[in-house]
């Protein structure tokens, strides 16, 4: 006789997906109505493994598909074939995908080919610009055509899906699971004194009398001149502000490494002492660094979602964003990659305390830390289960509103 539990296969392949799905994995694993296993494609190998270690996740299936200089067609084809094989072996009732990565699209297609239901976490984000970001904008639109359940992080995202004729009964506002992950890590940092001391010692090169600006950057549309502009702007900021230092965990992509090392690494000795380029860090360490920062300059969608919960202003080095809620809430500013604009916006945050406070004090428009509880409940309902399957979240598993 078939196990009466609902079989769920959670799929992901990149660091951002892993962070956002780690609390989802834990929520399903903790509930007796579900049988859950994990399939990772390892679209990004080393950065993915960092998150698996942080959240103590051991995938049942590891496709290990990353190859040097892999192309989008190559990795897409390998993921579809690999996930199809996994679905045939595991025979899940639901496949869960997240966001807008190549793994999300290809795993969703694999589930569709095997006629298995798909749940899409972080559904409905849109720029309505076909090639911005590339290929993420089309990835997420295509996943929406495949998905049977859409877990939107905000009311705006839900409205996008309804505008595209998704059935309202299949669209649920859950909030963003990254807030659940962030709050879990923050609580661990606050309760684990040896861990906090170890991190303080590891980053003892940071001067506590200086204001630290945390930098990230990785998007394809920024490769080339946009990254060069940002790097020159960072040197300008350090030059103009003697009490400022920059910490930049540099993405492993050669298109990022080359301009960062050439421009930041080529700064004068006097400036280079306040420009710290380090290897990418694990998620727990990155949250620690966010808490220590004065503000953040990034093109990361995840950071835009996390920083409001920490009271950290964000300058977004993109021309448009599928996460306008943070901009509207005042916690983020969309500044593009123009050198002078980056410098001007950073100097305003450094020199105008009222402006910085206005960007630091808003609530997080992306969630309250109960997104995973809502996702588990809605999936249980879709499979014919009772409401409020997580009793400890009674009263909190309603659709998140108003975001």
Image (cartoon, grey):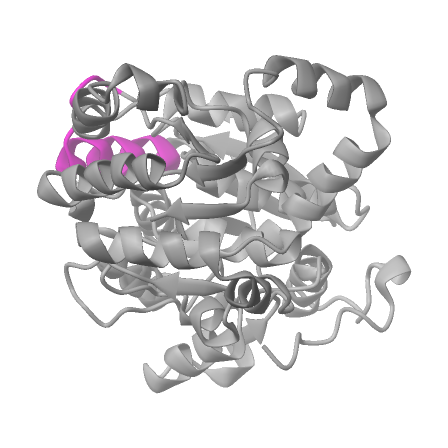
Q: How many marks?
A: 0
Q: Main secondary structure of the magenta part?
A: helix
Q: Position of residue 50 (x, y in %)?
A: 53, 22
Is residue 299 one of those drawn in magenta? Answer: no
Who's the residue at 70% across and 63% down the image? 368
Relative to residue 172, is residue 287 depicted above or below? Answer: above
Asked if residue 226 lies left or right of residue 146, the reply is left
Left or right of residue 347, residue 185 in this image: right
Write the residue at 23% across / 20% down: 261
Q: Quadrant of the C terminus?
A: bottom right
Q: Quadrant of residue 323?
A: bottom left
Residue under the point 65% across and 80% down? 401
First to last magenta residue range: 67-84
Left or right, 299 with respect to 200, comes to left
Q: x and y percent of residue 110 in the render? A: 34, 45
Q: Residue at x 75, y 24 (%)?
A: 196
Judge whether residue 13 can be spotted in this image.
yes
**Taking the image as drawn, is residue 3 in sight?**
no
Is 93 or 267 nearer to us in this picture?
267
Q: Establish if 225 lies above or below 39.
A: below
Nearer-the-camera pick, 319 or 8: 319
Looking at the image, which is closer to me, 367 or 229?
Answer: 229
Quarter of the image that includes the N terminus? top right
* Vertical position of residue 222 compared to residue 279: above or below: below
Q: How far from the left and from the top, in percent, is residue 53? A: 61, 21
Residue 96, compared with residue 392, is above or below; it is above
Q: Percent x, y for residue 114?
A: 38, 48
Question: Of all residues shown, which one is farthest toward the left?
Answer: 225
Q: Is residue 77 magenta?
A: yes
């Amino acid at each position: 006789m078939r196990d009466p539990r609902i079989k769920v296969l959670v799929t992901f392949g990149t660091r951002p997906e892993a962070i956002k799905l780690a609390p989802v994995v834990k929520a399903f694993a903790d509930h007796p109505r579900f049988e859950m296993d994990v399939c990772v494609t390892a679209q990004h190998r080393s950065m993915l493994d960092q998150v698996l270690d942080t959240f103590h996740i051991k995938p049942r299936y590891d496709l290990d598909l990353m190859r040097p200089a892999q192309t989008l067609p190559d990795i897409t084809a390998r993921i579809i074939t690999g996930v199809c094989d996994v679905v045939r072996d595991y025979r899940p009732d639901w496949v869960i995908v997240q966001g807008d990565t190549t793994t999300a699209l290809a795993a969703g297609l694999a589930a569709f080919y095997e006629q298995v239901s798909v749940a899409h976490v972080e559904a409905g984000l849109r720029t309505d610009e076909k090639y911005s970001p590339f290929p993420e904008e089309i990835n997420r639109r295509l996943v929406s055509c495949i998905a049977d359940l859409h877990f939107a992080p905000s009311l705006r995202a839900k409205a996008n899906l309804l505008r595209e004729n998704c059935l309202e009964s299949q669209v649920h506002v859950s909030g963003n699971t990254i807030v659940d992950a962030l709050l879990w890590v923050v609580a661990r940092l606050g309760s684990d004194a040896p861990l906090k001391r170890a991190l303080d010692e590891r980053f003892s090169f940071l001067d506590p009398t200086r204001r630290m600006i945390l930098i990230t950057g990785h998007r394809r549309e920024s490769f080339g001149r946009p990254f060069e502009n940002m790097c020159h702007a960072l040197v300008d900021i350090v030059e103009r502000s003697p009490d400022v230092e920059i910490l930049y965990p540099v993405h492993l992509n050669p298109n990022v490494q080359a301009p960062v090392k050439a421009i930041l690494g080529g700064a004068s000795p006097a400036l280079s002492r306040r420009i710290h380029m380090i290897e990418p860090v694990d998620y727990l360490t990155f949250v620690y660094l966010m808490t220590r920062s004065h503000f953040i300059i990034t093109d990361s969608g995840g950071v835009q979602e996390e920083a409001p919960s920490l009271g950290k202003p964000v300058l977004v080095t993109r021309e448009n964003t599928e996460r306008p809620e943070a901009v509207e809430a005042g916690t983020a500013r969309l500044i593009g990659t123009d050198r002078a604009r980056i410098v001007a916006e950073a100097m305003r945050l450094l020199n105008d305390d009222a402006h910085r406070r206005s960007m630091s004090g808003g609530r997080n428009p992306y969630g309250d830390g109960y997104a995973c509880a809502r996702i588990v409940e809605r999936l249980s309902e879709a499979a014919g289960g009772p409401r409020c399957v997580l009793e400890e979240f009674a009263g909190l598993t309603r659709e998140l509103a108003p975001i």
